[in-house]
Image (tube, rainbow, N blue to C red):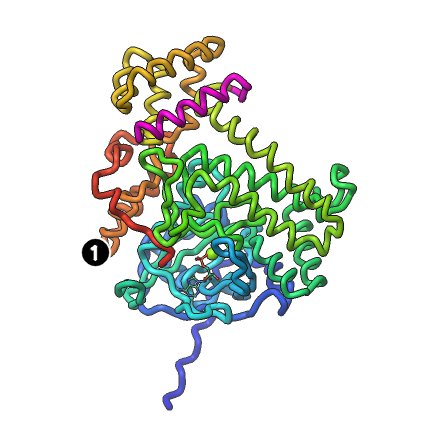
Amino acid sequence: MLPLPPAPAPLDLHLHFNNRFARLGDAFCAPLAPTPLPAPYWVGFSASAARWAGLDAAPTDAPDLLHALTGNRLITGSEPLASVYSGHQFGQWAGQLGDGRAILLGEVNGLELQLKGAGRTPFSRMGDGRAVLRSSIREFLASEAMHGLGIPTTRALCVTGSDAPVRRETLETAAVVTRMAPSFIRFGHFEHFCHHAQPDALKTLADFVIDHYYPDCRNDARWNANPYVALLATVTERTAHLVAQWQAVGFCHGVMNTDNMSMLGLTIDYGPFQFMDAYDPGHICNHSDTSGRYAFYKQPNVAYWNLFCLGQAMLPLIHDQDHAIAALETFKDIYPAAFAARMAAKLGFPEAQGAHKPVVEDILALLAANKVDFTIFWRRLSHWVRDEAAAADAVRDLFLDRAALDAWLARYAALLTHTPRAQAAQRMLATNPKYVLRNHLGEQAIHAARQKDFSMVADLLKVLETPYDEHPALDRWADFPPDWAAQISISCSS
Ligand code: AMP
Ligand code: MG
């Protein structure tokens, strides 16, 4: 057998790694290096995410960085690992899952850097450890789009590609997304240690999360000074706010399994997600979700269900079931209030009031009945508030039932009388995005990227980073989806 070539020396990027998760030890993770991919190339790079991580390298002049972020070279100070977690998938206990294709490089500036698609791990089960170009571009753009919208999310630093083949339904090519977040810890991490009756590890994990991300839980008087109840209540609150933001922008996650729920209340694991085109509360964006468990309108309830899984997993720490339930039940007040506040902002009001509720419910029902494009409606309504005469046709043209819309507009205008129109419009234009990552836009960017044209990935990124700005040169990306968009089928395959 030929001797293996020596492994290349680690690359010194002058990053100060502080690998706190790695120090949790063997029960939590398996140390391992990423598996290299041949001849990588840049597909997309987010300069704003790079700045957040304290990386100032520009991709074009950094071939070493390209190799490091594809998993071909270690970075000095990094202690790569895959972590173990479990979870409920589609409502069923799925047992051990874990990072089957994500490798945590370590933590820099308080941010964990993770390579998704960087090869097999002890948790890969039947999987190949890889991610395909298509889903990697979607995750990259969606992460940065959510950040641009102001919705909590894991970030994406870059996507690199390789012509290495990856088999899914057809033969595709490999890619790696570099993701960043203060932590990638999921509800499923807690479920893992509860299910495997490892109370010490469960406590270590909870203390780690509290000490690093929620230190206020140590002295939260509301929860009998029990930091674990306070943690459950805080995650409940964050999750309620997160899902309220999803519902207000028409974002359908698609796979809200408990292993895809972040302990920091971030949107995590972008797979078959969709920003809705025409408003349809029953919309199911994931082709693999045959029962519609994760239909758009069910997302708040699913979040609540998932939080109960977390609460169950934390019971060995909380001891008193009533305390856990009290913490979880805060969702019932926090979610509706958070959603009402978001919808009030979409309508231009400084805060939610009881009188808004029927107006919100009725416009959502009208949007659904008339199959109105969700993003375009809110944007046009913002223009209508600024200048009724100029924008009236643009709003009315969206509806078949114009009489119903006119009646609604009159009620809305009456509520708006106490709010200066210019102020309301300004608030609305900063709340109702012009651009969202519609499926067909992602598809076009992917199609071009497969021909090695990455310009649409870069241009879409620019627009999605500041989705409330006009970007007149790229207006066409704010337009209605083409007819073929309805045929796009996105499944769990990624
Ligand atoms: P997801 O549906 O992407 O959240 O993945 C669920 C679980 O399957 C996680 O443990 C993933 O790490 C794992 N997984 C998904 N795809 C692959 C793959 N191609 N290779 C290895 N593990 C995978
Ligand atoms: Mg996942």
Closer to the camera, 331 or 91? 91
Q: Decide: is 320 above or below 62.
A: above
Q: Main secondary structure of the magenta part?
A: helix
The disc labelled 1 sits on which kind of residue? Gln
Q: Which residues are magenta?
A: 350-371
Viewer can see residue 103: yes
The yes-or-no answer for disc 1 within 8 Å of ligand 1 is no
Closer to the camera, 89 or 117? 89
Task: Return the residue found at the far front.
Answer: 291
Q: Identify the residue at image location x=39%, y=63%.
A: 70
Is 16 in the magenta? Answer: no
Identify the residue position indicated by label 1 in the image: 451
Quadrant position of residue 192: bottom right
Q: Identify the residue at image location x=43%, y=28%.
A: 431
The picture places residue 15, in percent across and down from the top left corner, at 52, 57
Q: Decide: is 339 above or below 60.
A: above
Q: Is residue 216 left or right of residue 36?
A: right
